[in-house]
Image (cartoon, rainbow, N blue to C red):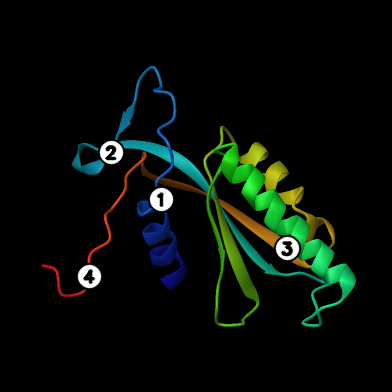
Amino acid sequence: MNILLSVTALVLVSTAPPAAPTATPDVGPGGFEMTTYYVALLYRGPKWTPQETPETRAIQDGHMANIQRLAQEGKLLLAGPFTDNGDLRGIFVFKVGSMQEAQELAAADPAVKAGRLRLDIHPWYSARNITVSARSPSTP
């Protein structure tokens, strides 16, 4: 459940540009226009290792370049690692047209292709383009 709360918080603070409007928007609770995002949870894969070698460095560099490219294309809204050093290593949140497209984009990541990471992708239904401004803990 904590992962879902974390994903919710991450998507809510994204500042992605708005997508083109659909013909008939789906309106959800509270009157928000809704859409489907695709959340990819990235776990340690069968070839994961904590050692840094020239090969693992090259894979990581490719992984980061892929993240930047997908973000620039507007397909990847959020990406980042979990910091508790568990099997769950990171997250991608895609805003694309289908589960198949999200699966293809995630599977093409160099770290996934190399077996250092494995994927678990889920469609997630949420308010479209919602953002929340950050406040300090003392702000009411």
Nearer the observer: mark 4 or 1; the answer is 4
* Left or right relative to 33: residue 121: right
Q: What element carries label 2?
A: loop
Mark 2 or 3 closer to N-term?
2
Residue 14 image label: 1
Nearer the observer: mark 4 or 2; the answer is 4
Q: Is residue 89 above or below residue 134?
A: below
Quadrant (top left/top right/bottom left/bottom right) for the C terminus:
bottom left
Q: Which percent across, then down, holds residue 119?
A: 68, 59
Q: Which amino acid does label 4 sit on?
A: Ser
Residue 118 image label: 3
- Label 3, label 1: how many angstroms apart (C-alpha)? 24 Å
Task: Identify which residue, 104 or 27, lies in the foreground.
Answer: 104
Mark 1 or 2 closer to N-term?
1
Q: Residue at x 83, y 70 (%)?
A: 56
Q: Which amino acid does label 2 sit on?
A: Gly
Q: Which residue is drawn at 42% across and 59% down?
A: 10
Residue 136 image label: 4
Mark 3 or 1 closer to N-term?
1
- Label 4, label 1: how many angstroms apart (C-alpha)? 18 Å
Mark 4 or 2 closer to N-term?
2
Q: Which amino acid does label 1 sit on?
A: Ser
Q: Which percent across, then down, holds residue 1?
A: 42, 70
Residue beneath label 2, please?
A: 28
- Label 4, label 2: how many angstroms apart (C-alpha)? 29 Å
